[in-house]
Amino acid sequence: MSEKTRYSDEELQEFKELILSKLEKAQRDYELLRSNIMNTDGNDVSDTSPTFKVLEEGASTLSKEEAGQLAQRQMKFIQHLQAALVRIENKTYGICRETGVLIPKERLRAVPHATLSIDAKNKK
């Protein structure tokens, strides 16, 4: 029996559903982070006393910087998930870009945007 070179359409559909659910959650998380950065919730330091205003602004700036970094990471994750959806459409999803062999389903379920098998990842 020859070794599988790609996942079946049914298997790809299973992965597509998994990715779409992760993508939906990631986009919600991104919007939450973005609203935190933009301060759309209305909580700011405009109504605090001048004594604490400097401390509050410093903490607020630090919090916004951290939220910005998290938002950047989240956007990168979203882009990886979207790229995985393109690979599903091209029927190249789940194929290691280094070795050309199928990435095990367990790895793809854990990291659905993976493009490297564990062996290839460990060699880098």
Image (cartoon, grey):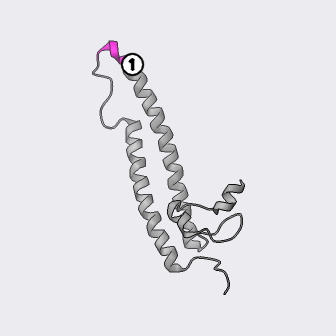
Q: Residue at x 39, y 18 (%)?
A: 55
**Residue matched to label 1:** 55
Q: Nearer the viewer, residue 117 or 26?
A: 117
Residue type for callout 1: Leu
Compared with 114, 61 (above or below) is above
Q: Nearer the viewer, residue 102 or 76?
A: 102
Compared with 43, 120 (above or below) is below
In the image, which residues are magenta? 49-53
Compared with 64, 88 (above or below) is below
Task: Tell me: 66 left or right of 100.
Answer: left
Q: Residue at x 48, y 33 (%)?
A: 65
Q: Position of residue 92 (x, y in %)?
A: 61, 71
Q: Residue lying furthest top in this view?
A: 51
Task: Tell me the chief SS of the magenta region.
Answer: helix
Residue 50 on the magenta span? yes
Q: Nearer the viewer, residue 11 or 90?
A: 11
Query: SS class of the residue under badge 1?
Result: helix
Q: Position of residue 61 (x, y in %)?
A: 44, 27
Task: Tell me: 113 left or right of 118.
Answer: left
Position of the N terminus by quadrant = bottom right
Q: Position of residue 57 (x, y in %)?
A: 40, 22
Q: Quadrant of residue 103?
A: bottom right
Figure disc tally? 1
Q: Residue at x 72, y 56 (%)?
A: 123
Residue 97 on the magenta span? no
Q: Quadrant of residue 58?
A: top left
